[in-house]
Amino acid sequence: MLLLILKRIGLGLITLFIVSLITFVGVEVLPGDACTTYLEREAYGAALDACIKRLGLDIPADERYLDWASNVVRGDFGYSLSGEMPINEVLGPRVKNSLVLASVSILIGIPLAIVLGIITALWRDKLPDIMISAITIFSMTIPEFISATLLILIVAIWLGWLPGIVIIPSDATFYELLSNIILPVVAISMIMTAHMARMVRSSVIQVMASDYVQMAILKGVPYWKMVFRHVLPNALLPAINVVALTIAWLLGGVVVTEVVFNYPGLGRLVIESISNRDLPVVQALAIILASIYVGINLIADLMTLMLNPRLKSLQIRK
Amino acid sequence: MNEIIESVKNLSIGFNSQKGKQISILRNVSTNIKKGETVGIVGESGSGKSTLALAMMGYIKQGLFHLKGECLFKSEDLLKMSSRQLEKIRGRKIAMIPQNAGQALTPNLKIGYQIDEALRLHTDLKKTERDKKISELLNKVRLPSPETMAFRYPHELSGGQQQRVAVAMALAGKPDLLLLDEPTTGLDVTTQAHVLELLRFIAKDTGTSMIYVSHDLGAIAQVSDRIVVMYAGEIVLEGPARKILKEPIHPYTYGLLKSIPKLSLAGLPASMPGSQPQPGSINEGCSFYDRCNLANDNCKKNSPDLEHIKELDTNVRCFNYKELINQNNNLQTSITKKTNNSEANEVLKLKDVSISYAKQKFFDQLLNKISDQNPTVKDINIDIKKGETIALVGESGSGKSTILKSIAGLLKTKDGQIKFENDRILSSDLKMRNPNDLRAIQLIFQNPDESLNPNHTVEQILSQPLKLYFNLSGEELKKNIIDLLKKVRLGEFYMSRYPRQLSGGEKQRVAVARAFAAKPDIILCDEVTSALDVSVQAAVLNLLQQLKEDLGTTYVFVSHDLAVVRAISDRVAVLYQGRLCEIGPSQNVYKFPSHPYTEVLLGAVLEPDPDIKPKLVAEDIVEEKPPEKGCSFQGRCPRKIGDICNSEVPPWQIGENGNAIRCHINIEELASLQQ
């Protein structure tokens, strides 16, 4: 088991290495470099030379990669060009904001999705299923920029209950954030919950049709006991990976929602740094997002392994 | 003994078709189960036998509706009970032993928990008493080391062990009635015999009534006191087991019994024409009319009632049953087949073939060799003559399908050669074989549902090999397809059909036609009849034999069913753990002296005759790997003589009948031991 975990971590690190290489090479082969894109029209003469010197662009690429990579390993992403401040300082509050938005959405959205999925599956083709399914399919089909805009129109403008856009400094405290994030959370949860509820529904329906559930009924197991002991553990196992992907997607910044609500999260930072041509920040973001995906998928795989006795003994035997 | 424990009265169950019509799949079924009695319900797939069995627990599958009638358990109607009331009966009064225990045990719960659950629901025992009871139950179903067994997950057990756990779980609530839905289907021959033995013991030991549902008359014959035969949702014959099996007075039962291949008979079983009608397709007349050779105009217009015949203690649904009384000796007949000309040339030779599933290590991969000292299949030497049918027989894990895949080029060999026509070596890699060799060797798979593309019409399915190998097109292609369909006795109109519009037997005929489309020299048949109903199986076997006699094709026939093999093959090779045990002409392999493994297999075969009981000579254990040295059967052999069996590979001995046996015991001694 331990060997397996180490093996998976190793594979994750290799993935990250490849991602870093690709982003670095990508930046290298683009026409121009960080200095010419940053200085734009002033990119000549002494200013350009000074910039190149300052960023160390005169050093050969392979040395620069090693230098950059070893700094990244130590947790130092270098300097942002546009803000002229350490990238860590740029990233810090953004990561925190995204984390807040993501965790609130997860805490509300995932349990809700599971409950809705189970209800629709158990009352399949009956009134609760028809109603909930109609709503989930509806909220799945509306693109998030429309639902977000509608939310702003109705709740913020017509009703005036909540602020329409997030106007807080990027280093706001958690309590300041809370009232501001309600609408973004609702916008995100609508789509996320709908997708997951559909997945849970089909998974539960599949397990309900299995031989072992029929056997449990014929054994005289009462209905709810059967649902909790025989159905749910088996039906929710495949959901773990979907939940993991959703969490990774949320942590990586929900670009559209963040832009609509003007939310200072990672997603908006991606857009900003790309349009500002702040290449060091883009590189840093690529690494961070890749680590989030790798890490969360690793956790999900390990959880599936732990919870599925079949996979567990298969791995141990190997 | 005469107390009725459950009685079904005029039960009809059906579903609503897409056109809104009500279609019944059980029609007016009435029967009684007496205390302490074992009733066998037999029928082919779609006869409604499982639906009946489940209804007897008050359970109706989703999509089906209770139309009329009742299921009275101790004079209370199960079909009117609330689920709360049913929970008190299911598992406590009536318990179920399911068909496929591997899928009927919840995968995330340990064996012990699942049995404990039944105990908690249906007894008042305390925790410590329940723990004791669990090991008692596991012991009773003869599972090894019952103490540790409780802590294992279902997937960690073999098929036979899972089935035993299901039995233990059913016994936990001390039920008055046990329902067994195909409890031995899908198990190996020897395991099947052991599980049946256990069930018979339990019936005797506990005095529980049993309802045994199966398509297999062999299994039914071993356990039942009384037999109910179902056809197209109706009971067609019901009576004492011996009477039904020895003197069937319904033409369907008669035909069914004749279509079962028997160990004692060489030659092919007689087949029944056609197949069971689809639910809802019978409008008037007898449901067996189309397939019956006693049918007359009366049968076409009027449907017969279930008639009680007092002197035979039998109920029968037929106008003309009297014609079948005293016909019983006709049951022991078969169609003789043309034996193969033994002078023929060898068409395929397997020389020292070994096959390994072991993963290649990195360095071995570079050197392109497989370093497995103990491969799955080892030292197979078989010469196959042109026009003969050679059968590979063995239980699951015997390597029979592995060898077949290797001949087809789907699996690389580790060692040895496969020689085709005039000793030309065939590459073990499919990509290296030339198109003509690919054409010459064709494969028919076990399950036509999976081997036919569901999105292709029969025409498209059959045109593929014709286009690929012969470049046919247009009118000529069509003519060839019609010819092929004619060969497998299907009409031209089947061309536009999709596989889902065909019955199981028809699908397998299309699969046979597809193999023959390539005009092959050798056809590899992988369990081609195991997914089919008995009456359809007989028809497919006869078809294969006919095609072979007409076209001179060679068959390599893989099967676990010794009776089927006896019927179709000229020569038999018996395999255990990927090693040959015995090989010879089939009439001799089925006679003693035999290899001890062949003896075990033959002893475990279930014949549809209550007087022939299976002999259980070997332990029912599953070996995961062949032994590293010595005889492959050392682990289970009932005739093991000592250390020599563990250390040395036994020599081949050739008996006077021409069958070769690989055993340390002298062949004459073996003959006298087995007398």
Image (cartoon, rainbow, N blue to C red):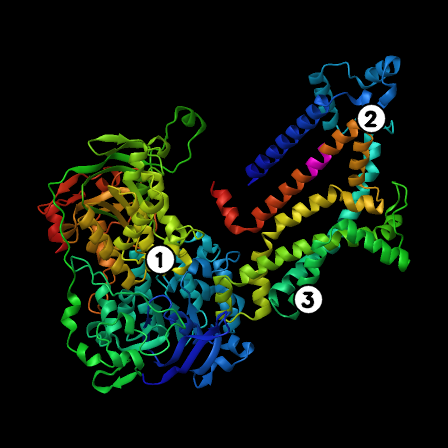
In-front residue for pair B547/B236: B547
Q: Mark 2 belongs to which amino acid? A: Tyr
Where residue A92 appears, as percent x and y from the top left, is 82, 36
SS class, disc 3: helix
In-front residue for pair A80/B660: A80
Q: Is residue B258 left or right of residue B39?
A: left
Where residue B648 appears, as percent x and y from the top left, is 23, 37
Q: Is residue A124 left or right of residue B24?
A: right
Q: Mark 3 belongs to which amino acid? A: Met
Local packing at callout 2 (Cα closer than 10 Å; few below 14, some 14-19, many 20+) is: some
In-front residue for pair A188/B595: A188
User: Is B10 covered by the magenta stretch?
Assistant: no
Please, is residue B495 above or below residue B89 in the view?
Answer: above
The chain identifier of the residue carrying mark 2 reads: A
Q: Mark 1 belongs to which amino acid? A: Tyr
SS class, disc 1: helix
Local packing at callout 3 (Cα closer than 10 Å; few below 14, some 14-19, many 20+) is: few
The residue at 16%/62% (across/down) is B334
Which range is magenta?
A287-292
Residue matched to label 3? A131
Residues tagged by mark 2 and mark 3 found on one chain of the structure = yes
Where residue B447 appears, as percent x and y from the top left, is 36, 53
Q: Nearer the viewer, mark 2 or mark 1?
A: 1
The reply to whether the C-beta atoms of the residues labelled 3 and 1 are less than 8 Å apart is: no
The residue at 78%/36% (across/down) is A270
Q: Is residue B75 left or right of residue A132?
A: left
The chain identifier of the residue carrying mark 1 reads: B
In-front residue for pair B557/B213: B557
Residue matched to label 2? A79
SS class, disc 2: loop
Residue matched to label 1? B494
